[in-house]
Image (spheres, coloured by chain):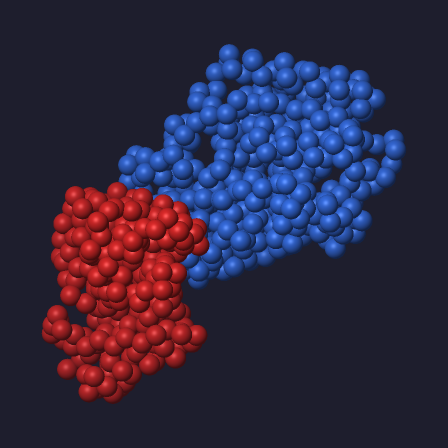
Amino acid sequence: MSFYCGVDIGSTWTKAVILGEEEKSDYTRALVRTGISFEAAALSARDEALARAKLAPEDITRTFSTGYGRMNAEFADGRRTEIACHAKGAFHSFPHPCHVVDIGGQDNKIIQLNASGAVEHFLMNRKCAAGTGSFIEEISRRLDIDMKRLEELAENATKEITLSSFCTVFSATEVIKLIREGENPENIAKGVFNAVVARVTEMGTLGGKVVLTGGVAAAFPIVAQILSKATGQEVFIPEHAQFTGALGAALEAKTSS
Amino acid sequence: MPKLESLKKMKELVAGHFTGLDAAAKDPARKVAWCTSVGPVELLRTFGFEVYFPENHGAVLGASRKANDYIPRANAAGYSPDICSYLTADVGAFLAGETPLTHGYGLQSVPTPDILVYNTNQCRDVEDWFAFYARHFDIPLVGINSPVQVGDVTDELVKTLVPQYEELIPVFERVSGIKFDIDRLREVMTDSAETSRLWGEVLGTMAHRPSPMTFFDTSVHMAPAVILRGLPEASDYYRMLLKELSTLTEANVSAVKNERFRIYWDGMPVWGKLRELSTFFNDVDASLVVSTYCNSWVFEAFDPSDPFNSMARAFLELFIARSDKAKEVIMAELCEKFSVDGVIYHDAKTCPNNSNTRYGLPQRLRERTGLPFTIVYGDLNDLRCFSEEQAKTSIEAFLEQIEGGRG
């Protein structure tokens, strides 16, 4: 029996996936905080995944790394960008022509896939992290509300607000203004998610089906609802959205020789 | 790529250019003009001016990674971080009383000018840039105010520009103390035309598969075409370089170790990252075989028998001054001639005129040619606007996309 490992070393979280010969949807996963050492995070995520799968490092036929820290995973046999891996992972879960929207900790990507899953075009956000996972973290800190509660609040919003700035810091200033004006936290919380979607839709046109991947999609399904409403498209979230890149890396490891 | 003998020669030429300028600036009998890189250099040389190019100084500041030491100084003096970072780096260095020419060529300062001459065919920033020095030195500031977004360069349009060139003559006569001599202008134009032709041939060698040079090499080799235009030394240099390049193409020597991808680089270099990006592209087997930036110093229109009309035409035909429709046609032709696999656009934060990403051109060119593209966000000089990590990820993903498309 052969096993393949994919490690996605992101700016905030490091994800590991182990696949066997059979491609089950409930593949082995592990998630660790990236912290200050990409190499240590990659090893830690892989080892945790190995432990869960009851495997040893030598049981893995091949490992591929992806994400910001992909070059730091020296134990990996190959490396692919997060664009290639999100494309591969998303197409595995949703094998149709589509636009993959990945909302990560530091950046957003839109990847256009054709009927065979090949990347036709991709876009990355410009340098500011507005509209990314870091943006949600920053605003929840400003609001002094646990991130996990943001979605619950947003669901009870009575008014649509959008934070319009391209800059996370300036968006935080907009939030302060809303607080000063007495806006209720529910509406502000919804505004945060509206802003996440607005930063994505202004990057490029989303035609056809949309697959939403990344940690933000996994933690806040409301983003998919808002994105669907904004684009008029059906938005599909893979079962383990945060692991899409790592899954793609594992699939790359499996198909590469 | 093997080290070329020509490079040694070019270093000598560039050193001679700066030390010559320094000597001229110190000699009351000689006159120094500062000119924009696509300004009326030929006309200035006719009057015996030694010509210095602040844009070249801007690039030297960028390449020596000094630009970010000086840009904040110009920002603080009222020159926005959003305007040309050649301007802000150059003005900032001037305000600091420093120049990399001291370390490189022993100059105590940039050569003091007697006149400033611009052409706004590149952008309006050059006029404001030179206006700073006109106020400081209290010297004449003259130039050509060129139309922008030029579509077809018609004879009628050319004719409207010619009087602006002619009006420079009395000013140049007064500052230089030399009478205008059209035969001397024809001689200078002959040298410029020859330099342009040879520089075009040099760039043409990159159509060979594998390419003997990349954009990173041509960004260096273009120096004589810019700063020595109108002088016979520039043509001599390119003859020497061409000879070496033909040996390389005959032997199929590749500039990158394994040319798997041939890429069009649109926009300016990131001067402070030339070495890193050159190494990176080499590592990922991609050769940047054509660029509109380096092609901008190929002036096909130069005609010594009709100097004023041809000068006006050549400077109107400049890529940066053209409409998006004209640019699309030019780029499509270059993509075909150089057999590229895709286009990388450098969107330079402080140079909107040299960033062809902002009005849908990449999408239209993709439709026209079927070639994929990606955009790298950065800047020519201001490294605060460039994320190396994000740029590299974007480029790597782009190459993966091209590879995937090959099946």
Which residue is at 66% across, 48% downward?
Answer: B73
Picture layout, residue B311 above or below residue B53: above
Q: Quadrant of the C terminus of chain A?
A: bottom left
In the image: residue B156, left or right of residue A254: right
Q: Nearer the viewer, residue B278 or A215?
A: A215
Q: Position of residue B102 (x, y in %)?
A: 76, 52
What residue is shown at x 30% (from left), y 78% (from top)?
A45
Q: What colour has chain A?
A: red
Q: Is residue B40 left or right of residue B121?
A: right
Q: Position of residue B366 (x, y in %)?
A: 31, 39
Which of the 4 image quarters holds residue A19?
A: bottom left
Picture coordinates of residue B91, whole percent (x, y): 68, 42
The quarter holding residue A250 reads bottom left
Which sits in the foreground, B20 or B94? B94
Tell me the colour chain B is drawn in.
blue
Residue B279 visible, this angle = yes
- B368 vs B171, nearest the viewer: B171
Spot occupied by residue A251 in the image (x, y as percentages of width and height) = 21, 68
Q: Nearer the viewer, residue B188 or A252?
A: A252
Residue farthest to the right, as pictured:
B28
Residue at position x 65%, y 46% from top? B76
How many numbered badges does the structure rendering display? 0
| Left or right: B196 in relation to A223 | right
